[in-house]
Amino acid sequence: MRKEKEKEFFAQHMETFRAHGIADPTFIIKTAYFVKGKAERQFQLFESEITKGTDIYIEFYDNVKDEKDNVTDIIPFNSDRQLFKYKSNPYYGEEYEMKEGMNYKGEPYKLYTIPVTELRAVLKDSTEIPYNVYQKRKDVGEPAEAPVENIKLPRLQKSLFPDFEQEFPNKESNLSLDDVYNTEIADAPLSEITIRDLAAIMLMKPISARPWLNDIIKQTKSEI
């Protein structure tokens, strides 16, 4: 049943794949669940899936069970049928929790547990947005394709992120756009921090366009 459902789910996203120019995507269906001690849902990829070195496209599903706990159907998890992309990560062995087990045939397997915040929502207008932005839009009842300026980011807790402009009032800047990303500049005022920079800081991933910020994140992760 799962394989047949996977084909049905795949057919739902053909238009989106065409919009993105993706002729032969790696597509799978997965469940997303909460783990004790984790704030966001998680999903799992088998070693055979995560080691392909290609981006993986995912739609989440729910199992429908009868009174004897037997699976009778597989249905979409999200009513909007959102398609997500897991971008191939060569550092999966260092960044994700792994567990080993045996399948019903007695064959060993490895599973990697990944937070859904690693995903990007693949939109029908040929763009992508981070999972957190997608979820924020969904929470306020806006379509996934809503303009970015409509999304209000939550206020950061003062205890975690101090008011840098208050603490360092003498650090004024008249940097040009070229200067902002100059590798020789090791700081930038809070007013010039981009959403990408904020994502890099909060996710602790070197995805900023500022090399010096990426270097700080890499060094910090190596010391943890």
Image (tube, rainbow, N blue to C red):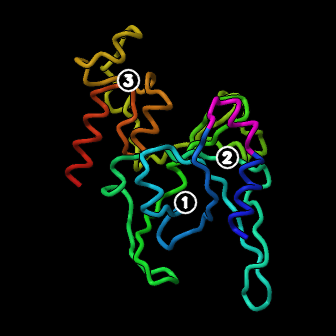
Q: Position of residue 198 (x, y in %)?
A: 45, 36
Instruction: Give the amino acid type for the residue marked by disc 2 in the picture.
Output: Leu
Which picture quadrant has residue 34?
Answer: bottom right
Label 2 sits on residue: 83
Left or right of residue 119: residue 67: right
Residue 154 seen in this snapshot: no
- Residue at x-position 70% and y-position 29%: 19
- Which label is found at residue 189? 3
Q: Earlier in the sequence, mark 1 or mark 3?
A: 1
The secondary element bearing badge 2 is classed as strand
Please state, as top left, top right, bottom left or bottom right, where the C terminus lies in the image: bottom left
Q: Are marks 2 and 1 in contact (CB under 8 Å)?
A: no
Crowdedness of circle 1 by 10 Å Cα count: few (<14), some, many (20+)?
few
Instruction: Give the amino acid type for the residue marked by disc 1 in the picture.
Output: Glu
Q: Position of residue 166 (x, y in %)?
A: 38, 31
Q: Which residues are magenta?
A: 13-23
